[in-house]
Amino acid sequence: MRESVHKTVLLNETIDGLNLRDDSIVLDATFGGGGHSKEILKRYPKVKIIALDQDESVFENFKDPRIIFVNENFRNLDKALDGQKINGVIFDLGLSSDQLENSGRGFSFMKDEPLLMTMKANPSPEDTTALDIVNSWDEKNLADIIYGYGEERFSRRIAKGMREARKRGEIKSTRELVKIIEESVPMAYRRGKLHFATRTFQALRIAVNDELGALKEGLEKGFEALKDGGRMSVISFHSLEDRVVKNFYREKAKEKKAILINKKPIVPGEEETRENPRARSAKLRVLEKTI
């Protein structure tokens, strides 16, 4: 049994924002390392939790009758709930440390792994992978997703580098991809504070898993599933996700269907970012349904 190494970000703030009671039903739409669910059950022992994750391996360490585990992407949370109404829903949109460190699916540019980048533990042949994208998409489409999803200013140079590399053979591993990116960007960029491969890897992961499309669907379905007075806590980690969440919240508030619990996002304090550097970009937004 693998021990989770994931540190849950903004743990207390996320749960406090839900304003739960002992008889609440909570949807943990991104179970991951289970940090939120464990803390909720510690505080509210009678709460019922429905936990979703499309990576079924994350459920292996947890055996608790108060948690119903569903191996599903949160864009399909309506199927998991089957009409059941809930008091709170959590979306933690960060990639868990367990997936970065242990999945072997190519999420990290610090390890040499197969180019998969899919959240599914056992992808089917029909599922799109990063291997498919870097080896078969044309240069313009590659540049578009690297810029659009990664906000990478050297996207065209990187896409061109991928196209040239393909002439020599299939790009199969994260190490090969990192080398291509390294050779495509300026020397000064390679020495920057942010690793030069970060934005490209982010873009490929978002494209492989259709993360922004899934987020829009999940937010809408999660909101519909909330009871009147129910709350939604969403933690995002990059500007594209946060923009989707912010716009969704604003639209619901404008329609008089919800109120913003925090008009500005809640961010980690100095102590949390010092203990967990991956928390530094996190933003929490909380919404309450009013109809």
Image (tube, rainbow, N blue to C red):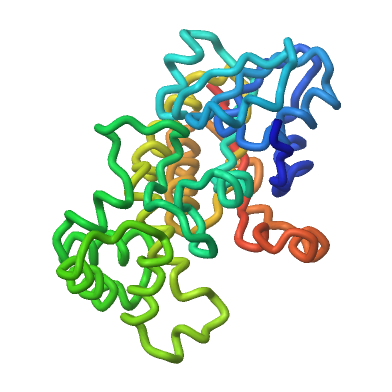
Residue 16 appears in which quarter of the rendering? top right
Q: Quadrant location of residue 63?
A: top right
On screen, residue 4 above or below 26: below
The x, y position of residue 4, in whole percent, is 71, 40
Image spot of residue 286 (x, y percent): 62, 40
Q: Is residue 232 visible?
A: no
Q: Which residue is found at the position 45% from the left and 75% from the top?
A: 196
Location of residue 210 in the rendering, given as x and y in whole percent from the top left corner: 34, 42
* Left or right placement of residue 99 versus residue 82 in this view: right
Indicate the quadrant containing the N terminus: top left, top right, bottom left or bottom right.
top right
Q: Front-most of 257 and 233?
A: 233
* Residue at the bottom extreme of this rendering: 188
Q: Residue 98, position in %: x, y?
A: 62, 44
Q: Residue at x 65, y 25 (%)?
A: 60
The image shows residue 91, relative to residue 291, as above or below, that is below
Residue at the front extreme of this rendering: 169
Q: Nearer the viewer, residue 106 or 87?
A: 106
Residue shown at 53% from the left, 26% from the top: 56
Residue 150 shows in the view: yes
Q: How many marks?
A: 0
Instruction: Tell me the residue at 65%/47% (across/down).
Output: 262
Q: Nearer the viewer, residue 271 or 206?
A: 206
Say which quarter of the image contains residue 33.
top right
